Image (cartoon, rainbow, N blue to C red):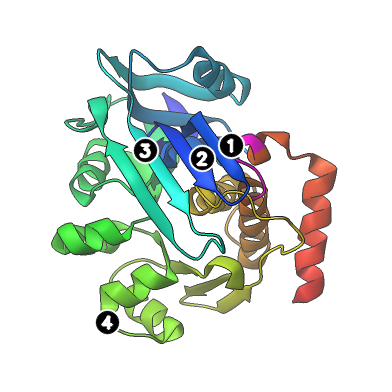
Amino acid sequence: MENKILTVGSIAIDELHTPKGTRDNILGGSATFFSIAAAKYNPVNLIGIVGDDFPQSGWELFKKYNINTDLVTIEKGSTFNWGGKYSEDYSTRETLYTNLGVFENYTPNIKDSINTEYLYLGNIQPSLQLEVIKQVRSKKRIVSDTMNLWINLDIDGLWKVIKKSNIFLLNDEEAMELTNKTNLKEIASDLLKLGPDIVIIKKGAKGCLLMSNKQTLEIPVFDQIDLFDPTGAGDSFAGGLVGYFSKYGEDNLEEALIHASVTASYTVSAFGVDGLVSSSEDSFKSRCQYIKSKL
C-alpha cells in the first residue's frame, strides 16, 4: 500500500459545551481532524480503532474525503467518547468525562506493505507512537504532536519520540512545561538539537513559531472569525501543514504555515469538523491573502 500520508491517532465521538451552545454525538479525535484537513491536499491512510457503535455518517465522511479506512479496526464495544466544557472566554477547558472504550487497550498492528512519504503521529501515548514508528518501516518524514498529559505521565517516552521525529509540533504551554523554560525561541532551538529539523510551537490566538536549522518564522492567525469551538484546531493545523508538504514540498515553509493556520481557522469557527468540511477554495485563498497582508 502506497500513500503520501499515513496517520495514527484517536477517532472519537465528542460532546461539547461552549459559550455558543452544546453539541453531542459529533465526530472528533486527533486522527479525524488531521485526516480531513490533510485529505484536501492528498489521500490519507488512517490507522485507528472504533467501536461497533461508530456512526455510518462518520464512514461516509471519510469516504467523501478519500480517506482510506482499511486499517481502522472495528471492535465490539464503544468508540472513544470525550466530553468537554469551555469557559465563557474560552481561556480554559474542563474535561467532563473520558470513556476510552475500545481505544483503551489498542495497539496498532500495521502491515509491512505500507509505504508512506509522511507519517503523522497524533497526540496519543508515546509508547504507541514509538510502536508505529517501528512498524512502518518505509517512511520519509516523521511528524509528531503531543499533549500535556504525556509530559506528566510518560516524559521519557516523549523524549524518545522527539528524537525520532523530523518535524515536531507542540503548543506554547506544553513547550514551557516540557523544558521548564519560558522563552519559546530558546525552547525551539533546544528541541532542534535533539533530532527534529523543524520545530513548530503553536501559540493559539497569537499564531505560531517555526524554527528550522535555516530559518525562524512567526505567522499570525486569521482573526476575522467568530470563535465557536477550538477542539481539534491543533490537529487541523498539523493536517494543513503535512498536506501542504505532501503536495508542494518543504521549500516554502512560510506558505506551509499560512495554509496550516488558515486550515485551523475553519475548525475553530464551527462545532467539530463542520468548519473544515464547509470551507471553499475561494474562501481559503482569501484567508491566506489576509494573513500575508499581516506579515
Q: Earlier in the sequence, mark 1 or mark 2?
A: 2
What residue is at 55 percent from the left and 17 percent from the top?
Answer: 57
Residue name at image x 72 percent, y 64 percent: 223
The residue labelled by disc 4 is 180
Amino acid type at mark 2: Phe
Q: CA distance from mark 4 to mark 1?
A: 34 Å
Residue at image location 33% in from the left, 80% down from the top: 190
Q: Secondary structure at mark 1?
A: loop
Q: CA distance from mark 1 to mark 3?
A: 15 Å
Residue nearer the viewer, 210 or 59: 59
Position of 9 with respect to 60 (left or right) is: left
Label placed on residue 82: 3
> Is 20 rendered above or below residue 253?
above
Whole-number angstrom distance, CA of label 1 to CA of label 2: 7 Å
Q: Which is nearer the N-term, disc 1 or disc 3?
A: 3
Q: Which amino acid type corresponds to the residue marked 1 in the rendered image?
A: Val
Chain-order first, disc 3 or disc 4: 3
Q: Which mark is nearer the camera, 3 or 2? A: 3
Secondary structure mostly seen in the magenta stretch = loop
- The mark that comes first in sequence, 4 or 1, is 4
Residue under pointer 2: 33
Q: How far is mark 3 from mark 4, CA to CA?
A: 29 Å
Q: Look at the picture and state if 109 lies above or below 141.
A: above
Q: Which mark is residue 273?
A: 1
Nearer the observer, 252 or 47? 47
Residues at marks 1 and 3 touching, judged by CB atoms closer than 8 Å = no
Give coordinates of residue 169: x percent, y percent. Answer: 42, 61
